[in-house]
Image (cartoon, rainbow, N blue to C red):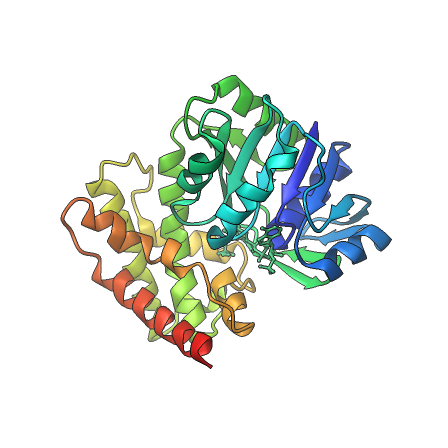
Amino acid sequence: MRIAVVGCGAMGSVYAGRLASAGHDVLVVDRWAEHMAAIAEHGLLVSGPDRETRVPVRAHTTPPRQPVDLVVLAVKAADVETAALQARPLLAPETVVLTIQNGFGSADVVAAHLGGDRLAVGVASGFGASVKRPGEVHHNAMRALRFGGHGDLDHAEIERVAAAWRQAGFDARAVTDIAAMQWEKLICNVAYSAPCALTGLTVGEVMDHEHIGPVSRAAATEAWDVARARGVAVSVTDPVALVRDFGAQMPAAKPSALLDHEARRVSEIMFINGAVPREAAKIGREAPVNATLTALVRERETTWSET
Ligand SMILES: NC(=O)C1=CN([C@@H]2O[C@H](COP(=O)(O)OP(=O)(O)OC[C@H]3O[C@@H](n4cnc5c(N)ncnc54)[C@H](OP(=O)(O)O)[C@@H]3O)[C@@H](O)[C@H]2O)C=CC1
Ligand SMILES: CC(C)(CO)C(=O)C(=O)O
């Protein structure tokens, strides 16, 4: 399969490295010129719990005019709109666009610009990935990828994409209820994103922390309540057990919100903890735990943008 990964940061690099190692024809696009130059010169180095690979991939700072079978948008949520607009040279009528972000809202943004009929949504769970230095990425775990259609995309097409990823060693599956998967991932993310960003604790340190543990568990439970109240078919019966198990798989990982704060960058908090009060409001409810966590994170981020 001809695949372009737009946004070759922590996750985009893991996707690109493994897909290229499995023999797919992969090109990557990222605006970080030093990272692209390192990949062009030495290949992309991906280290994980099971193996380390260095693989040659074509690296670009802007998308080449070169239509592919699959475009993977692996940027952060706030960058999805620009990335979707810039991805146009990679598109042919039959190209599938797969957008993979934590939190809610990205697929609607992509659909508004590129249309919904060739659009798939991905949920990536349990990777704990970060860029170590230009050209080198590490991930702490590698649990699951779930893909679903956003609009009218035929399920067989999504299955074809999932099969290509399975061939690259991912636990990837095409599902019919991607919203339930998104909520289950959101429950995990809200437990860690704001609590870790605010305290500097890792995923493994939060859950049983004397002061932050109860806050993290309350954030997850609140998101679970909202999902069920909205009628989403989440399969989870114990949200605390879910997030505890999620964290136990990669105790040393730092959520990307914490990595963003360490770099004094605005995080995706509005799409993650901030999504819970927004979704709750749609059914006339409130989500005070996640609203408060979001406000605290936002306040810190405002301070940086003012300096
Ligand atoms: N890291 C993880 O373990 C996991 C992350 N996720 C989710 O995956 C998504 C991606 O996260 P992650 O990989 O950590 O993010 P990163 O910031 O590591 O990677 C995104 C990359 O895309 C680049 N970029 C942004 N806009 C463009 C553009 N228009 N064109 C080209 N490149 C662009 C960024 O550059 P710049 O730095 O200049 O902005 C950055 O290098 C997020 O939604 C995250 O929540 C999901 C599961 C696990
Ligand atoms: C690391 C974390 C918790 C946040 O970026 C994540 O979403 C994942 O690995 O699935």
Outermost residue to the left? 284
The reply to whether residue 207 is visible in this rendering is no
Q: In which quarter of the image is residue 58?
A: top right
**Residue 154 in the figure: left or right of residue 225:** right
Residue 156 percent coordinates (x, y): 52, 18
- Tell me the residue at 26%/62% (across/down): 291
Q: Quadrant of the N terminus?
A: top right
The reply to whether residue 132 is visible in this rendering is yes
For the image, the number of numbered tags is: 0
Q: In which quarter of the image is residue 183?
A: top left
**Residue 80 in the figure: left or right of residue 12:** left
- Tell me the residue at 33%/75% (across/down): 211
Using the image, determine if residue 191 lies above or below residue 157.
below
Using the image, determine if residue 67 lies above or below residue 6.
above
Residue 33 percent coordinates (x, y): 72, 59
Residue 267 percent coordinates (x, y): 46, 63
Q: Quadrant of residue 302?
A: bottom left
- Tell me the residue at 40%/42% (across/down): 182
Q: Nearer the viewer, residue 299 or 61?
A: 61
Using the image, determine if residue 70 lies above or below residue 136.
above
**Residue 30 in the figure: left or right of residue 108:** right
Residue 257 percent coordinates (x, y): 47, 63
Outermost residue to the bottom? 307
